[in-house]
Amino acid sequence: MTDKKASTDYPIHELLAERWSPYGFEDRPVAQADLRSLFEAARWAASSFNEQPWSFFVATKENPEEFARLLSCLVEGNQGWAKAAPVLVLGVVSLKFSRNNKDNRAAVHDLGLAAGNLVVEATARGLCVHQMIGIVPEQGA
Ligand SMILES: Cc1cc2nc3c(=O)[nH]c(=O)nc-3n(C[C@H](O)[C@H](O)[C@H](O)COP(=O)(O)O)c2cc1C
C-alpha cells in the first residue's frame, strides 16, 4: 500500500483517511492469516436482528480456475484492472430473514457495514480494497 492520505476538513482516524481504491496491485498473494482476519472483521459487523445476511465468495490467484470464474463476473472495464488483484471477493446477501422468511429491508445496508469492517481491517494490515458494482454475476454461471 502506498502512502496516500485524504486531506480532511476535520480530524478523522488515520485508518479512514488512509483508505483508497487502487487500480494497481503488487504481484504477491495475501497471507491466509490476513485474509481470514478480513472476513472475521466483516463477521463482527452490526446487523439488523443480528441476521448477518451476508456471504462472501472468495477467489485467490492460487486457484486460477476459481479466480477466472469470479473475474468473468465483472464488467469488461473492471476486468481490465481487477485481473491484477491477488484476491477477488463477491459479496451477496439474503433478502429474507432466515427465522421467518420475511423481507429484511436492512440486508443490503448490513452487507455494506460488513464490507466497511473488512475495508478498515484491510487498511490496518497495509492492504487495499477496491469495491465494484460493475458486475454481471450471471456471466460466472
Ligand atoms: C459500492 C461501490 C461500488 C463501486 N464500483 C466501482 C466499479 O464498478 N468500478 C470502479 O472502478 N470503482 C468502483 N468503486 C470505487 C469508487 O469509484 C471509489 O471508491 C471512489 O471513486 C472514491 O475513491 P477512493 O475509494 O479511492 O476514495 C466503487 C465503490 C463502491 C463503494
Image: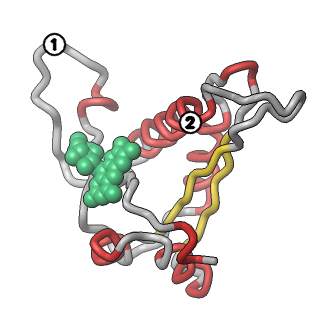
The residue at the point 72 percent across, 30 percent down is 103
Q: Image quarter for residue 69? A: bottom right
Q: Nearer the viewer, residue 114 or 40?
A: 114
Answer few, some or many: residues within 10 Å of disc 2's Cα (few below 14, many 20 plus, some between 14 and 19): some
First reached walking from the N terminus: tag 2 or tag 1: 1
Identify the element where label 2 is drawn.
helix
For image coordinates 44% across by 63% down, the residue present is 135
Q: Is residue 131 visible to us here? A: yes
Picture coordinates of residue 54, whole percent (x, y): 66, 42
Discs 2/1, front: 2
Residue 35 at what x, y percent from top left? Answer: 58, 55
Residue farthest bottom in this picture: 65
User: Can residue 128 be seen from the camera position used here?
Assistant: no
Q: How is the structure coloured here?
A: secondary structure
Q: Amino acid at mark 2?
A: Val
Q: Residue at x 50, y 36 (%)?
A: 112
Where 77 sits versus 115, above or below? below
> In the displayed image of the protein, which residue is found farthest to the front?
102
Mark 2 lies on residue: 108
* 30 w.r.t. 110: above or below: below
Label 1: state its secondary structure.
loop
Label 2 residue near ligand 1, CB within 8 Å = no
Left or right: 112, with 141 as reference point: left
Q: Which residue is mark 1?
A: 10
Mark 1: few/some/many CA within 10 Å (<14, 14-19, 20+): few
- Kindly identify which numbered label has been placed on residue 2: none
Quadrant of the image containing the N terminus: bottom left
Q: Amino acid at mark 1?
A: Tyr
Query: Mark 2 and mark 1: span between their CA atoms?
Result: 29 Å
Left or right relative to 107: residue 8: left
For the C terminus, give its image quadrant: bottom right
Quadrant of res 13: top left
